[in-house]
Amino acid sequence: MKCLETRKRNGMKWRRYRTDDGRIVTTLEVPESVLRGAAPADRLAARLAAWERGQAQRARRHAVLQRIAEGVKPLAIAHELGLSTREVQRIKRVRHA
């Protein structure tokens, strides 16, 4: 990952990164004292897990769209990425809608 920019706003740092697969991710660095006062640790852990699942889903979607742009057929993409053919076709349809 490569950091594209860092900004400081309201005492917090915002950073934009470009991942190895070309996606851009924005992060917000919140002080730990703020996190401890905001929510119980179990809720934070659940939200972090949900965020990680979302990142993985966006990475898969990006990989599918990249392979479609290269002209690879949906069946081959599904086998390559371990997805169902229906899921690959859905991503393709949503992108072109």
Image: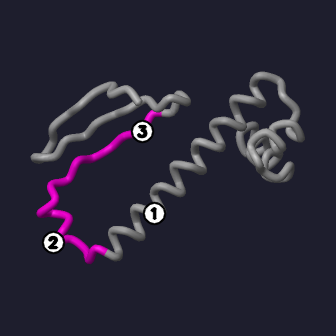
Q: Nearer the viewer, residue 70 or 83?
A: 83
**Mark 1 highlights which residue?**
49
91 to the left or right of 22: right
Q: Position of residue 95 (x, y in %)?
A: 71, 39
Q: Is the residue 9 above or below the residue 7 in the image?
A: below
Report the amino acid beneath label 2: Gly
**Mark 3 burial class by Cα count in 10 Å: few <14, some 14-19, many 20+:** some
Q: Quadrant of residue 92?
A: top right
Q: Quadrant of residue 74?
A: top right
**Neighbourhood count class around disc 1 (C-alpha, 10 Å): few under 14, some 14–19, many 20 upward:** few
Image depth: mark 2 or mark 1 in front:
1
Q: Amino acid at mark 1?
A: Ala
Which quarter of the rendered picture does the N terminus lie within?
top left
Secondary-structure class at tag 3: strand
Q: Where's the C terminus, which quadrant?
A: top right
Asked if the magenta segment contains residue 64, the reply would be no
Q: Which residue is mark 3?
A: 25
Q: Which residue is mark 2?
A: 37
- First of labels 2, 3 by sequence position: 3
N-terminal of the pair, mark 2 or mark 1, is 2
Q: Secondary structure at mark 2?
A: helix
The residue range painted magenta reads 24-41
Residue contact at pointers 2 and 3, CB within 8 angstroms: no
Left or right: where does residue 43 sit relative to residue 12?
right
Residue 39 lies in the magenta stretch: yes
Q: Quadrant of residue 5?
A: top left
What distance separates the C-alpha of mark 2 from that of mark 1? 20 Å
